Amino acid sequence: MVGPVLAAQWGYLPGFVWIVIGACLAGAVHDFVILWASVRQDGLSLPEIARANIGPLSGVTTSIATLFIIVTILASVAIVVVNALSESAWGMFTIVVTIPAALLTGLWMYKIRPGKVGEASVIGVVIVLLGVFLGRTFAASGAASWLLFDKPTLSIMLPVYAFIASVLPVWVLMCPRDYLSSYMKIGVMMVLAVGIFLVHPVLKMPATTPFIGGGGPVISGKVWPFVCIVIMCGALSGFHALISSGTTPKMINRESDIRVIGFGAMVVEGFVAVTALVAACALPPGDYFAINVAQDKPGQRAAYVRMVETAGTQHGWDLSPKDLPRLEEGTQEKLVGRVGGAVTLAAGMSEIFTKLPGMKTMMSYWYHFVIMFEALFILTLLETGTRVARFVFQEAVASFNPKAAIGGKPRWWINVGMSGATAFCWGYLLYTGNINTLWRMLGISNQLLAVIALAVGTTYLLNHAPKRAYALCTGIPFAFVVVTVFTAGVQSIQGWWRAIPAAEPGEQFSLQLMCWLASIMLVLTSAIVVDAVRKWYSILRGPAAGISPAAAVEPT
């Protein structure tokens, strides 16, 4: 949901077009085919599917690339939470309360009253909502300073938390809190959708802005290829392939559910992305940029002022804040310079909610409820992603040492060590990065993972589909995404490398690291793409016969 908010700097039209086309023709197909392939192959993970259908080279390369990609993804999404919760006692209080709520829910379900899901759900949801309502009282009390943390401190706390959560049994914290957060996600999205239809907010952001040619203050690249990089979840997300393979197949009751879960859920996510885009674009453009442009340092503040002046003199576009003081008073938070998209989304959504009957005085509660919803979603991703990295590592090591296989009861130090290494790596990137570099890295790495998944899916369809023409369903999106993500990757590397001489000493190494990481991921993905094309050529030269009866089912 953050991607559409950041993409609003180019106007509402580019993001809307990419969400609609991407979700229907790329993202939903991507999720469906990988889920279908994994179900048909006994729940294999993406690297194992690549190994089975393309070859050992692609299998090993996919494992290595996946590890690099997961690390960059986790660092990039974590910075959204850091920017949203920094110096916010109310926001931190709501998140802290969810930990005992999840622990009690898990204990109730599994130990105290096994099987009493309804009772545990009521208890957990009530505690979570109490955290939102009592947060205001806590923030006004003398104890508020206990939960006031700056960005560097939060950048250390998050990876430490993710490490602890990832080594605990899943029923203790991760599953119950993810279960509770699902209520928050569904509730927020339903209320937002109803609110948009009832309130009918006017889109104050123009269809396109002067930043479509590049030089934007939020994301500095041109609208293409970067709108396809910035908006991932909601249009096309390679991270979905990691969940669609290995994890989701173990929860599928019957194959007919794949269409709803794989394809349908992605279409719904596209709808959610559109609502997020509407919430951001309903804010006055001056307020949008005042929130989304960093202004912590004197140089950043000066750059923001120049941007506002340039927009007025060269483009006749007034970017002075309009409703920002009222929004800050209503949310009871400082909003200026809170980059990352989460704060903008929460402010836009709370503005819509308060226009519903009886909600005029509830802006601060709605704002912090949305912040909690976004933070819970990302925290779950951090926990899950750290676990997935450990699983992928174990699969890769299993190729050389069978004792490290997931099903072979790996020693505890392998689990703890890999979780710790993963958390340290993405924690370092989080501590040294910023939203512009990290979100670009997230988009590049995530869409490179989508390239890998689409290559694997195309190969699987060529091998198993009753008609080879079905492979075009993934082959066409594959071609588009390859061109898009490699263009974005090369342009980003060139831009970061040129920025190194003028950067501060502390930022120079971070930019160099980003260049090397992006280059490594591009090289690894290139190797998989070449290997996949080689495999396609070999398949297409042979006869179409030989498809197993079990696989010869019309895909739906």
Image: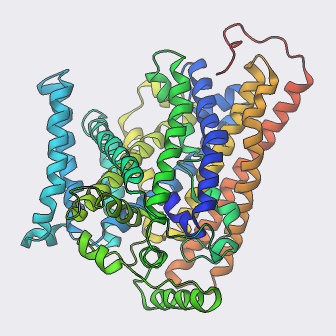
Q: Position of residue 479 (x, y in %)?
A: 78, 45
Give the residue at x 60% y 37%: 28
Give the residue at x 58% y 61%: 441
Q: Quadrant of residue 493?
A: bottom right
Relative to 98, say whether 37 is above or below: above
Report the quarter where the C terminus lies: top right
Give the total of numbered labels.
0
Is residue 111 in view?
A: yes
Left or right: where does residue 94 sit relative to residue 512?
left
Task: Give the colour scheme shown.
Answer: rainbow
Left or right: where does residue 20 sit relative to residue 192?
right
Q: Position of residue 500 (x, y in %)?
A: 62, 80
Q: Position of residue 136 (x, y in %)?
A: 14, 64
Q: Is 257 in front, or is 385?
A: 257
Relative to 425, say whether 248 is above or below: above
Is residue 428 in view?
A: no
Q: Is 331 in front, or is 237?
A: 331
Q: Quadrant of residue 539?
A: top right
Q: Is 212 in front, or is 388?
A: 212
Q: Residue furthest top?
A: 549
Left or right: where does residue 122 sit relative to residue 11?
left
Left or right: where does residue 534 sit relative to residue 394?
right
Q: Residue furthest left?
A: 142
Q: Quadrant of residue 222?
A: bottom right
Q: Position of residue 555 (x, y in %)?
A: 67, 20
